[in-house]
Image (spheres, rainbow, N blue to C red):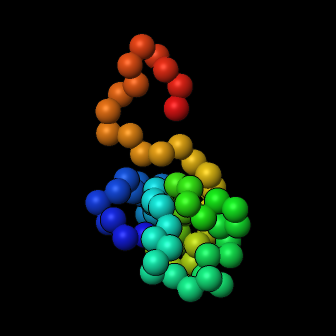
C-alpha cells in the first residue's frame, strides 16, 4: 500500500482495518500471491497491531469513493 492517507479504522484497541490497493511495483511476485487474480483490485486488510499479523484479507472490495453516489446508484 503506498497511500497512507487512505481510509483506516480501529476495530478495537489492538485491531486496525485498512482499505487500500496493492502497489504492484513495490512487491516481488511471490509477495502478491495472496491476492490471486485480484492483484489490481481494492482490498480491506485487518491487522493485529500488537503482533503485526494480518488477521483477515477481503478481496475485492468496492473502490474508495470521496463523493456520494448520485440518484441512489450502486457501487
Q: Viewed as shown, does residue 11 lie left or right of 32? A: left
Above or below — where is 71 with respect to 46? above
Residue at the extreme left of the image, as rendered:
5
Horizontal and vertical percent position of residue 17: 48, 59
The image shows a total of numbered marks equal to 0
Q: Quadrant of residue 35?
A: bottom right
Q: Residue at x 45, y 71 (%)?
A: 23
Q: Is residue 17 visible?
A: no
Above or below — where is 40 with respect to 69? below
Q: Residue at x 64, y 59 (%)?
A: 38
Name the one closer to the observer, 52 or 62: 62
Name the one closer to the observer, 32 or 14: 32
The N terminus: image quadrant: bottom left
Residue at the extreme top of the image, as rendered:
71
Horizontal and vertical percent position of residue 20: 45, 59
Horizontal and vertical percent position of residue 7: 37, 53
Q: Is residue 64 visible?
A: yes
Q: Residue at x 33, y 65 (%)?
A: 3
Horizontal and vertical percent position of residue 16: 46, 63
Q: Residue at x 58, y 72 (%)?
A: 54
Q: Quadrant of residue 41?
A: bottom right
Amino acid at each position: 500500500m503506498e497511500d497512507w492517507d487512505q481510509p483506516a479504522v480501529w476495530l478495537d484497541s489492538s485491531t486496525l482495518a485498512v482499505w487500500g490497493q496493492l502497489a504492484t511495483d513495490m512487491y516481488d511476485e511471490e509477495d502478491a500471491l495472496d491476492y490471486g487474480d485480484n492483484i489490481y483490485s481494492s482490498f480491506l486488510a485487518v491487522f493485529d497491531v500488537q503482533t503485526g499479523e494480518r488477521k483477515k484479507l477481503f478481496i475485492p472490495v468496492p473502490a474508495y469513493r470521496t463523493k456520494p453516489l448520485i440518484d441512489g446508484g450502486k457501487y
